[in-house]
Amino acid sequence: MELTLPETPVPARTAAAPAVALRGLTKRFGAVTAVDGLDLTIQPGEIVAFLGPNGAGKTSTIDMVLGLSRPDAGTAEVFGMAPRTAVAHGLVTAVMQTGGLLKDLTVAETVELTAALFAHTRPVAEVLQRAGLTEIAGRRVGRCSGGEQQRLRFAMALLPEPELIILDEPTTGMDVEGRREFWSAIRADAERGRTVVFATHYLDEADAYADRIVLVSRGRVVADGTAAQIKALSAGRMVTATWKDVGTADALALRRLPGVEDVELRGDTVLVRAADSDGVARHLLTTTPARDLQITSRGLEDAFLALTGDNR
């Protein structure tokens, strides 16, 4: 986490400058192009999920937005200035997956020590309360759960009152309760108008918390919109039915129907992904013993796989 702030005034920003503006952003590691001419604009106040399979270029892009690495081509600006300048002045902070915590300090001592690195910060008690840590302020970090440690990193990131917080896989390894508590803290703080950009492998988090989803594959943006818009890019629906003693031969017959993309058998349940869901439903109801049919829209996971499958 970048948490250094010199005692110099924040430079004037361009009027109405985007929170993040990436133009032709490119990053290479030898013969591998991790980020390939990526274009992205994020406006102040947005909550954006930055999604993609492993190797899609998410972390490399985030590193350049945080000023941790420089692009080989293209430009990256944060609030109209160079990323390192924005970070140095406390306009952007990050909550990463691991690191940055001393296990023998208490939660409050950790936040107090971090606050000493800044020229100006919010009161320690305030950020502890906003991160949901007041009740465990006296607990040693080494005795905190993974979710509590991530909320501690969140509290540390809140100290300079940043206008942009970047979360890189912040809930990896957390249990369900820990994830819920962490996102409750993030969501409550985001209501203050802060810009939040997060990368995650948990698609349900993107669906539940993001105003906008950006999908990247092979270092480029392949889809950008609301969760509903991203889901709509994956055409077709799922037809689910109960079919006693359904077998492989039945599945093969279903696959030959027009518009069928995939057939999956789960015991006595058959799941059919198809562009023509009505046609599949008619076939199941009139020519097979299938019953209890359901037709549902494709989910975010389906869209993710369809749009980024060539990068898996």
Image (cartoon, rainbow, N blue to C red):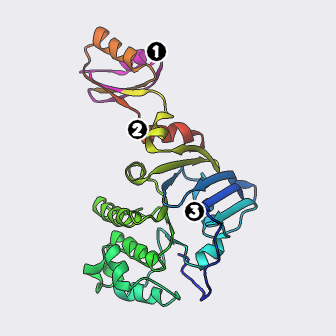
Residue that carries the numbered disc 3 in the rendered image: 19
Mark 1 neighbour density, 10 Å: few (under 14) some (14–19) many (20 or more): few
Side of 120 where 11 appears, left or right? right
Query: What's the residue at 42%, 82% (across, down)?
Result: 122
Residue 105 visible within the image: no
Query: What's the residue at 39%, 71% (across, down)?
Result: 150
Callout in the foreground (1, 3): 3
**Callout 1: SS:** loop
Residue that carries the numbered disc 1 in the rendered image: 256
Is 248 within the magenta? yes
Residue that carries the numbered disc 2 in the rendered image: 299
Side of 168 where 293 appears, left or right? left
The amino acid type of the residue labelled 1 equals Arg
Mark 3 neighbour density, 10 Å: few (under 14) some (14–19) many (20 or more): many
In three-dimensional space, the C-alpha distance between marks 1 and 2, rounded to whole angstroms, equals: 24 Å
Side of 117 where 149 appears, left or right? left
Residue 238 lies in quadrant = top left
Q: Residue 13's x, y, as percent?
A: 63, 70
Q: Residue 90's x, y, as percent?
A: 55, 77
C-beta proximity under 8 Å, tags 2 and 3: no
Q: Which is more N-terminal, label 3 or label 2?
A: 3
Q: Residue 30's x, y, as percent?
A: 75, 59
C-beta proximity under 8 Å, tags 1 and 2: no
Callout in the foreground (2, 3): 3
The amino acid type of the residue labelled 3 equals Ala
In three-dimensional space, the C-alpha distance between marks 2 and 3, rounded to whole angstroms, equals: 29 Å
In this picture, which residue range is highlighted in magenta?
Answer: 239-268
